[in-house]
Amino acid sequence: MSTMLTRIATAAAALTLTAVLAPPQTALAAPTAPADPATPPPSLVEASSLAAGPLKLVFGSLQADDLEESGEDEVRVELKEPDGSHYYIWPTNGDEADTKVRTCWVWTSDASDCSAGSTRRAAGPYVHLTGHPGATFTIEVWEDDHIGDDLLLRIPVTIGSGEGTQYINATSPGGKGFSYRLAARIEPA
């Protein structure tokens, strides 16, 4: 696992963090999964909405209200497209972030939603994505585990019409023994 993460981190260092919008001809072609999960996805373009302007996904914060493991969790954020392609979004080095209970990772302060009494930590960069109205994808938060990684949060997203800001606020389902909250938004690029 460590060797794989080192390769991913090396590849990620060479990448730009902004996805480039595909021209309409490319957007209509069947998508293919990149060989490296750290490679940013192509833009999230829906063929029926190419006339609308681009929108960007802005991450605000990820707060751990209760952990999956005792002590601390090692978390990462991924994006999955309907065709099964997945991409590491954060941390950008392909690793995980050590997270204690009541830690609130903040990417963009004006989009964050940290509760009173939480420990705020700067999350640093994340892979910036652009898309168009109608595009669909899923944001997932995972906890790294030696036996098998555990899904902490799954947020299906469909980009709206592009008129105004679209807020994304999600919490882990109850009864799981852990609780995470993610705040993000979609806004004009």
Image (cartoon, grey):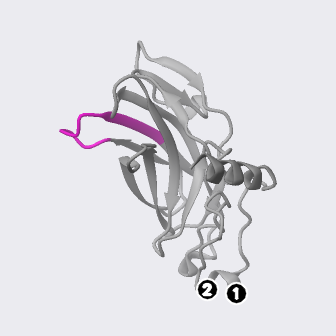
Is 104 on the left-hand or right-hand side of 34?
Answer: left
Rendered view: 28 above or below 139: below
Callout 2 amino acid? Leu
- Residue 30 appears in the figure: yes
Residue 43 got which mark?
none
Compared with 77, 41 (above or below) is below
Indicate which disc residue 28 carries: 2
Where does the magenta region start and end?
Answer: 172-183
Q: Which mark is residue 25?
A: 1
Identify residue type, mark 1.
Gln
Q: Is residue 125 left or right of residue 97?
A: right
Q: Quadrant of residue 20?
A: bottom right
- For image coordinates 60% across by 34% down, the residue present is 107
Name the element at disc 1. Answer: helix
Alpha carbon distance from label 2 to label 1: 6 Å
Kindly state the secondary structure of the residue where label 2 is placed: loop
Q: Are marks 2 and 1 in contact (CB under 8 Å)?
A: yes
